[in-house]
Image (cartoon, helix red, strand yellow):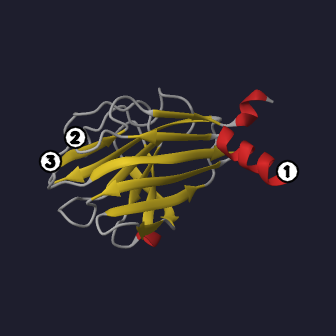
């Protein structure tokens, strides 16, 4: 019975989402889906990616609006690539290092486009099939009761796959209801 309530509590703060499969050319990495969880002040994620190591793909960028205020932080991606996808209020950037996941870096983002390294985030990866990888990690110190999340894979100087395809993932902590 205790296990049931723990599972219920954890899934109440989680979002499972899928991405369109093969919407990018097969020479690029492709997001498949994942789970994100906000529990108190900790955001955790598990994302599945196809062809992350088989073809050229740059890092995975995870933009996080961590304070729930879209008027603060970055307002677009123009500082590191073309303005292909709009962002609203990304306060944090987790740059997933696919070759050394334990040294993935968390940055603070400012509205002027500057970014300040905050810490290494020990992420991990598991090859689940010869071409599929599960990446996972946790970011603590989230101050807002809701977060907006957008992921990109950088491909040859342009954004490759976007996850989710349209909009952002919006996640609320249950403490908002207390």
32 or 42: nearer the viewer: 32
Question: Is residue 40 in view from this perspective?
Answer: no
Residue 96 is left or right of residue 8, and the answer is left
- Report the residue at 33% width, 72% height from top: 99
Residue neighbourhood size for the residue with mark 2, other residues' Cα within 10 Å, grouped as few (<14), some (14–19), many (≥20): some
Indicate which label's residue lies in the foreground, 3 or 1.
1
112 or 7: nearer the viewer: 7
21 or 82: nearer the viewer: 21
Q: Position of residue 1 (x, y in %)?
A: 85, 50
Residue 101 is left or right of residue 58, and the answer is right
The correct choice, above or below, for 117 with respect to 142 in the image is below
- Report the residue at 18% width, 63% height from top: 55
Determine the image quadrant of residue 174.
top right
Question: Is residue 64 in view from this perspective?
Answer: yes
Q: Mark 2 = which residue?
A: 23
Q: Secondary structure at mark 3?
A: loop
Q: Mark 3 = which residue?
A: 25
Q: CA distance from mark 3 to mark 1?
A: 47 Å
* Marked residue nearer the N-terminal end (3 or 1): 1
Q: Position of residue 53 (x, y in %)?
A: 26, 67
- Report the residue at 21% width, 43% height from top: 81
Q: Are circles 1 and 2 on residues that touch, CB within 8 Å?
A: no
Q: Secondary structure at mark 2?
A: loop
- Report the residue at 63% width, 37% height from top: 144
Q: Position of residue 138 (x, y in %)?
A: 56, 57
Q: CA distance from mark 2 to mark 3?
A: 7 Å
Q: CA distance from mark 1 to mark 2?
A: 42 Å
Q: Mark 1 = which residue?
A: 1
Indicate which label's residue lies in the foreground, 1 or 2.
1
């Amino acid at each position: 019975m205790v296990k049931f309530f723990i599972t219920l509590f954890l899934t109440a703060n989680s979002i499972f989402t899928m991405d369109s499969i093969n919407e990018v050319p097969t020479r690029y990495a492709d997001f498949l889906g994942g789970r994100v969880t906000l529990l108190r002040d900790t955001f955790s994620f598990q994302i599945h990616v196809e062809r992350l190591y088989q073809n050229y793909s740059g890092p995975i960028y995870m933009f996080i609006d961590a304070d729930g205020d879209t008027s603060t932080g970055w307002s677009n991606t123009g500082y590191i690539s073309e303005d292909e996808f709009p962002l609203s209020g990304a306060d944090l950037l987790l740059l997933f290092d696919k070759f050394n996941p334990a040294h993935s870096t968390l940055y603070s983002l400012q509205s002027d486009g500057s970014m300040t390294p905050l810490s290494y985030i020990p992420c991990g990866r598991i090859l689940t099939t010869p071409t599929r990888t599960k990446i996972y990690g946790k970011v603590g110190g989230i101050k807002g009761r809701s977060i907006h999340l957008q992921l990109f894979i950088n491909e040859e100087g342009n954004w490759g796959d976007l996850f989710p395809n349209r909009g952002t993932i919006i996640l609320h902590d249950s403490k908002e209801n207390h």
